[in-house]
Image (cartoon, grey):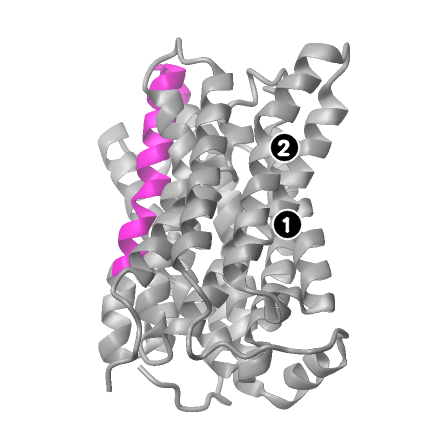
């Protein structure tokens, strides 16, 4: 049976998600312009920590289930845009040692993103019951493109100033938030939660084995994903240097954009396949393939440049293609009145895991030969497949 929703809903949510999440990796793409070229891991981790704090507060107060998704999304876009560009430029212009201020502002961008990414999922879940994995495939594809967008801007030419990247990302974030506010009300499957507190969330975790399986699969996926995205430029540049043919910075950025951005294809295609097979087999297949890429990465580092880049492009597709399906499984396994809070809490734990894996790779990048750095990410997919492949699932609508 078709659901009573306007055709504009999914395209606008997807566009707004792309616009809002373009704030995510602007710090990585412009770290040299921010005077923190040697601190990419700290810049990335500041955003992740902000996202964790924001999602934990949102989950505890059940903000995502108590207020209209479009208003939360718009307000979060405004906050993120302000911290990303005008306040950052003010800090760089007025402070003799702006590093701490820049990291604090990246942290606040992460807090704002806690009201963008999971709230976008909740907005989609309020309009889609059957076919949620398909809808979230488009939504996560937008997140992937938004994440890769700053690398594209840096690849357009070495003369593009970092401030233009920051300003552009902030501008489109505001436009995306405004579109969400204007055209995406809460859908017919939205359920409001009247009170705050973590007791009912813990009860849902204990009593729903399918929820636990989906969440732990997602955690394994997150161990790999953001560390891979953060260190793709390093990995591409290290391979070129190992062959004695260093790659220019704009070219590295272009390949980073392609490798990260192509993940949108994995999200969207996985969404279509999930309509026939369900979200669980799609998620497990893609997580298994990305884990295999981790294991094979030391061997593939020895390949000629075209084959090595083709390997990374494939890895970029499968490393994120499972994300919307795990998100759909978490939403489907959650009690209807707690979908927003549980998705937000699972996001918080997942992103806490990314901070550990990013910092670990940063340490290993200086201690291990480059070919072996990415191999440690295999632990996440191995654990995720083992847990998510277990029983305890309940039938979910497709």
Write down the region rendered in magenta: 239-268
Between tags 1 and 2, which lies in front?
2
Q: Position of residue 300 (x, y in %)?
A: 34, 41
Residue ID for mark 2: 83
Q: Nearer the viewer, residue 10 or 352?
A: 10
Magenta stretch contains residue 187? no
Residue in the picture at 23% in, 31% down = 306
Q: State which tag comes first along the sequence, 1 or 2.
A: 1
* Secondary structure predominantly adopted by residues drawn in magenta: helix
* Number of marks: 2
Magenta stretch contains residue 260? yes
The answer to whether residue 34 is above or below residue 74 is above
- Kindly indicate the quadrant of the structure image that contains residue 209: bottom right
Residue 10 lies left or right of residue 143; in this view the side is left
Q: Position of residue 72 (x, y in %)?
A: 57, 56
User: In terms of secondary structure, where does tag 2 sit?
Assistant: helix
Numbered mark located on residue 254 in the image: none
Q: Position of residue 283 (x, y in %)?
A: 38, 69
Residue 272 lies left or right of residue 348; in this view the side is left
Q: Position of residue 285 (x, y in %)?
A: 34, 68
Residue in the picture at 56% in, 63% down = 219
Residue ID for mark 1: 51
The answer to whether residue 14 is above or below residue 244 is below
The answer to whether residue 115 is above or below residue 328 is above
Pointer 1 with pointer 2, Cβ within 8 A: no
Residue in the picture at 54% in, 79% down = 191
Residue 46 appears in the rendering: no
Residue 182 lies left or right of residue 356; in this view the side is left
The answer to whether residue 55 is above or below residue 173 is below
Q: CA distance from mark 1 to mark 2?
A: 14 Å
- Kindly indicate the quadrant of the structure image that contains residue 246: top left
């Amino acid at each position: 049976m078709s659901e009573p929703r306007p055709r504009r809903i999914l395209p606008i949510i997807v566009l707004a998600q792309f616009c809002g999440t373009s704030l995510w990796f602007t710090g990585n793409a412009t770290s040299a312009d921010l005077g923190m070229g040697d601190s990419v891991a700290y810049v990335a981790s500041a955003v992740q920590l902000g996202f964790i704090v924001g999602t934990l507060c949102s989950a505890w107060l059940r903000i995502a289930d108590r207020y209209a998704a479009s208003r939360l999304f718009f307000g979060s876009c405004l906050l993120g845009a302000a911290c990303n560009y005008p306040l950052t430029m003010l800090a760089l212009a007025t402070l003799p040692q702006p590093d701490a201020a820049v990291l604090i502002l990246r942290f606040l961008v992460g807090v704002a993103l806690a009201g963008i990414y999971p709230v976008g999922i909740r907005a989609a879940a309020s309009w889609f019951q059957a076919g949620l994995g398909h809808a979230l495939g488009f939504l996560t594809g937008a997140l992937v493109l938004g994440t890769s967008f700053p690398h594209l801007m840096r690849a357009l030419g070495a003369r593009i100033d970092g401030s233009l990247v920051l300003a552009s990302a902030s501008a489109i974030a505001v436009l995306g938030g405004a579109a969400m506010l204007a055209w995406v009300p809460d859908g017919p499957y939205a359920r409001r939660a009247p009170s705050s507190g973590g007791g009912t969330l813990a009860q849902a975790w204990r009593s729903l084995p399918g929820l636990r399986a989906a969440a732990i699969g997602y955690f394994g996926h997150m161990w790999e994903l953001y560390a891979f995205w953060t260190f793709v430029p390093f990995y591409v540049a290290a391979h070129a240097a190992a062959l004695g043919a260093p790659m220019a910075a704009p070219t590295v950025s272009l390949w980073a954009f392609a490798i990260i951005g192509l993940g949108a294809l994995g999200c969207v295609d996985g969404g279509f396949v999930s309509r026939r097979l369900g979200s669980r087999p799609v998620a497990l297949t893609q997580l298994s393939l990305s884990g295999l890429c981790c294991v094979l990465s030391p061997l593939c580092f020895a390949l000629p440049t075209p084959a090595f880049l083709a390997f990374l492009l494939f890895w970029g597709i499968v490393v994120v293609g499972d994300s919307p399906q795990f998100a759909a499984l978490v939403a489907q396994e959650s009690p209807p009145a707690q979908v927003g809070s549980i998705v937000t809490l699972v996001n918080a734990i997942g992103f806490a895991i990314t901070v550990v894996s990013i910092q670990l790779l940063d340490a290993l990048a200086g201690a291990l030969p480059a070919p072996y750095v990415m191999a440690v990410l295999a632990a996440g997919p191995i654990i995720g497949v083992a847990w998510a492949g277990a029983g305890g699932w309940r039938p979910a609508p497709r």
